[in-house]
Amino acid sequence: MRNLFALLARTHRWLLFLALWGVALGWMNTTYSHHRTALAGWSLRASGSWLNAAGNVQEWTHLAESNRLVMLENARLRAELESLKERRTAPWQTGDASVLRSPGWNGSPWMVLNRGGRDGLTPGAGILSQGFAAGRIVDTTAHESLVLTLTHDVAQWSVRMGHSGQAGRLVAKEGDVRRASVLDIPWSQLVLPGDTVMTTGFDGVFPADVPVGMVEDVVGNETDEFQTVVVSLGANYPGARHVVWLEHPRNGRLDSLSSAPSNTP
């Protein structure tokens, strides 16, 4: 306590000055409107500056967290993009073969080629005829291949209208080697005769955007949800003499998986 009194005795002049200064400011603030306004403005500017600084600190904290999340998202998207590039740039092996038997011969929907397993062909490879999708190899011997064509009535193929239209299922018209039908196309998709039907690439047999044929007609009732698109196939099966095969490393794996025996009892 003695030390406190000694401190007050040494600083009593400063304390008195501060007290009188405070009284003078209060008296001036209550007496003169100009000074009162100036003091209020200074107080508002000081509080505004403080709030702005506090807001900047909080915003900086949020920006730091947002930047961290954006960096993580960019890393994920970059990895996904590189993965997609790797898939798209994976090589498709190609070659040619002669047709020994084609759909329409003896009423059969199958195609037989003069290339087989020893020539590098494996089940799952896609077949093109005159630049159009024609079928898929399902079995091979040493020097022959059996092709499931688009004209087989038990097969379904993933196609779309043009390059970016709705996707649907291509199914054969029984007994017709020149036409097929595309199902599951909603009426909201505008389809006109002459439009090109393309592969989607989803089934793994063909890459995307391989032409299949041209739209010939659209049938169905508009009260239904879907329309049926009649397609004139681009592959000339009755006159086919030479074809091109497309094979991707993934084709064999997909075919082996689809033909693997089920483990369910």
Image (cartoon, rainbow, N blue to C red):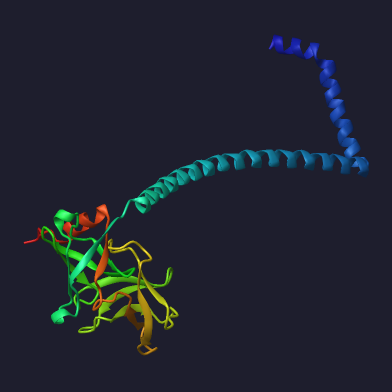
Vertically, is 56 above or below 214? above
Residue at the spot x=37%, y=84% of the render? 216
**Residue 75 picture quarter:** top left
The relative height of residue 115 versus residue 6 in the rendered view (above or below) is below
Q: Nearer the viewer, residue 34 or 25?
A: 34
Q: Residue at x 24, y 81 (%)?
A: 177
Q: Could you tell me how many numbered marks the image carries?
A: 0
Which of the pair 84/141 is nearer the observer?
Answer: 141
Q: Residue 58 at what x, y percent from top left? A: 60, 41
Residue drawn at (24%, 71%) of the image = 241
Q: Position of residue 7 (x, y in %)?
A: 75, 12
Tell which of 190 and 76 is nearer to you: 190
Decide if residue 65 is on the left or right side of residue 3.
Answer: left
- Compared to residue 214, the image places residue 4 above or below, namely above
Relative to residue 71, is residue 17 depicted above or below? above
Q: Is residue 227 left or right of residue 99?
A: right
- The image quadrant of residue 25 is top right
Q: Residue furthest left?
A: 265
Counting from the top left corner in percent of width and height, residue 210 is at 36, 66
The quarter of the image holding the N terminus is top right
**Where's residue 123, x and y in %?**
18, 60
- Determine the image quadrant of residue 118: bottom left
Residue 197 lies left or right of residue 157; in this view the side is right
The image quadrant where one finds the C terminus is bottom left
Pick whichever, 26 or 52, lies toward us.
52
